[in-house]
Image: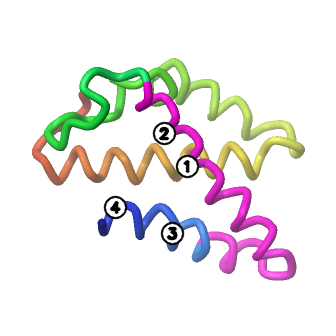
Amino acid sequence: MLHAFLHITVPGLYALAFYRPHWRRVWLVLAAALLLDLDHLWATPFYDPNRCSINFHTFHTYWAIGGYVLLLWPERTRIWAVGFLLHMVLDYTECWQRGIYLP
């Protein structure tokens, strides 16, 4: 539950800190990065509390993360890229809490 809460509040804090004039719109885009979790739908089992998402699910692979880094350069995709990368960092912290380092 805390993990899901962080996926909403951390993007909000980021938007407030760096995009104050348009923080609501930016926060919605950053929070929309939760759509990356759609790749959990084709995982078997659907949910495993002991599994680390990083490098297991399709949109959480190192290749995908590299793509999100590349999306930082065009200004048009930068906010989406930050949202995706924040999502990866938050998912990795959950792995780290379970004792999984660099899955």
User: Mark 2 is on which residue type?
Assistant: Asp
To which residue does mark 1 refer? 34
Q: Residue 54: x percent and y percent?
A: 35, 32
* Quarter of the image that includes the N terminus: bottom left
Residue 44: image x %, image y %? Answer: 28, 21
C-alpha span from label 2 to label 1: 6 Å
Q: How dense is the environment of label 2, judged by Cα within 10 Å: few (below 14), some, or many (20 and up)?
A: some
Give the extent of the magenta segment: 14-41
Nearer to the camera, 75 or 26: 26
Disc 1 marks which amino acid?
A: Leu
Above or below, 91 against 16 in this view is above
Label 4 sits on residue: 3
Identify the residue at image location x=78%, y=81%.
20
Q: CA distance from mark 4 to mark 1?
A: 12 Å
Mark 3 and mark 4: Cα distance apart in space:
10 Å
**Of callouts 3 and 1, the N-terminal one:** 3
The disc, 2 or 3, on the residue closer to the chain's N-terminal end is 3
Q: CA distance from mark 2 to mark 3?
A: 17 Å
Instruction: Kindly state the secondary structure of the residue where label 2 is placed.
Output: helix
Residue displayed at 52% across by 35% down: 38
Which mark is in front, 3 or 1?
1
Dot 2 corresponds to which residue?
Answer: 37
Q: Quadrant of the C terminus?
A: top left
**What residue would you read off at disc 3?**
10
Mark nearer the N terminus (3 vs 4) = 4
Classify mark 1: residues with Cα within 10 Å, few (<14), some (14-19) or many (20+): some
